[in-house]
């Protein structure tokens, strides 16, 4: 009987020790779960902040896109000289972007490589219409269509800031557009820097 009682006592001690070990593990898991819930709540808060920032930026982009415009302006009486600039007159992209930001009048002028094509009205550019790309500063106006009244041959585009040529965007080949034919130049005007 003493033997059975000792065995039962040992079994009870083992069960009690196992229970205590499980209680310790359960407490540790409850603590880890509490920490995980706190981290999850923090992550949800951060996600809410990021979503709000995304929505703000999306709205800002939409506003900027709506303010971008390329409106034709009256061509001058005589064509302006416009074509490639001397190497020492070429601005870096940062300087060109700064010059555009400081200018009161920003125009893209169509050129035959030496002078302005008068039958295509210059475009006055307003808003955040410029994007840095690998080749240079790109005019980013979606659906930029031109419709010449007579055949034209465009060798490139000149950027005029407050009446003075500041940059040149050469075409890889001459763009020939017959009279009355519409052409999309949305991805064509890039000023290298």
Image (cartoon, helix red, strand yellow):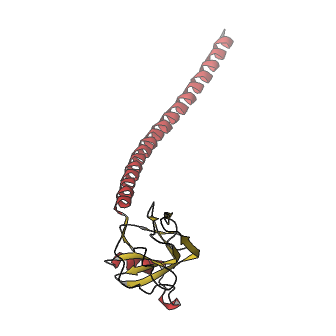
Compared across the picture, whether 70 is left or right of 83 comes to: left
Count of labels shown?
Answer: 0
Residue occupying image coordinates x 36% and y 61%: 64
The residue lying at 53 percent from left, 89 percent from top is 87
The image position of residue 10, as x and y in percent, is 64, 20
Q: Residue furthest top?
A: 1
Look at the picture and state if 68 lies above or below 32.
below
Which residue sits furthest right? 3
Q: Position of residue 162 (x, y in %)?
A: 34, 82
Corner quadrant of residue 141: bottom left
- Of residues 40 and 185, the one nearer the viewer is 185
How far from the left and from the top, in percent, is residue 81? 44, 87
Residue sitting at 47 percent across and 89 percent down? 89
The residue drawn where x is 45% and y is 60% is 143
Q: Residue furthest left?
A: 104
Residue 86 locus on image (x, y percent): 51, 90
Of 149 and 13, nearer the camera is: 149
Front-most of residues 14 and 119: 119
Looking at the picture, does residue 27 appear above or below residue 35?
above
Would you place residue 31 above or below residue 182 in this image?
A: above
Q: Quadrant of the N terminus?
A: top right
The residue lying toward the viewer, choosing from 31 and 133, is 133
């Amino acid at each position: 009987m003493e033997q059975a009682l000792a065995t039962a006592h040992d079994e009870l001690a083992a069960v009690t020790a196992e229970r205590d070990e499980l209680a310790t593990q359960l407490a540790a898991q409850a603590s880890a779960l509490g920490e995980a819930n706190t981290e999850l709540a923090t992550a949800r808060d951060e996600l809410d902040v990021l979503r709000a920032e995304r929505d703000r930026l999306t709205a800002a982009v939409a506003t900027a896109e709506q303010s971008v415009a390329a409106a034709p302006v009256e061509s001058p009486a005589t064509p302006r000289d416009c074509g490639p600039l001397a190497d020492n007159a070429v601005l870096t992209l940062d300087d060109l972007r700064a010059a555009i930001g400081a200018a009161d009048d920003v125009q893209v002028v169509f050129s035959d490589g030496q002078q302005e094509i008068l039958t295509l009205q210059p475009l006055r550019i307003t808003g955040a219409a410029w994007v840095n790309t690998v080749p240079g500063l790109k005019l980013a106006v979606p659906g930029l269509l031109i419709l010449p009244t007579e055949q034209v041959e465009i060798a490139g585009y000149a950027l005029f800031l407050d009446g003075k040529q500041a940059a040149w965007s050469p075409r890889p080949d001459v763009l020939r557009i017959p009279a009355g034919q519409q052409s999309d130049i949305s991805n064509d005007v890039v000023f290298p820097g």
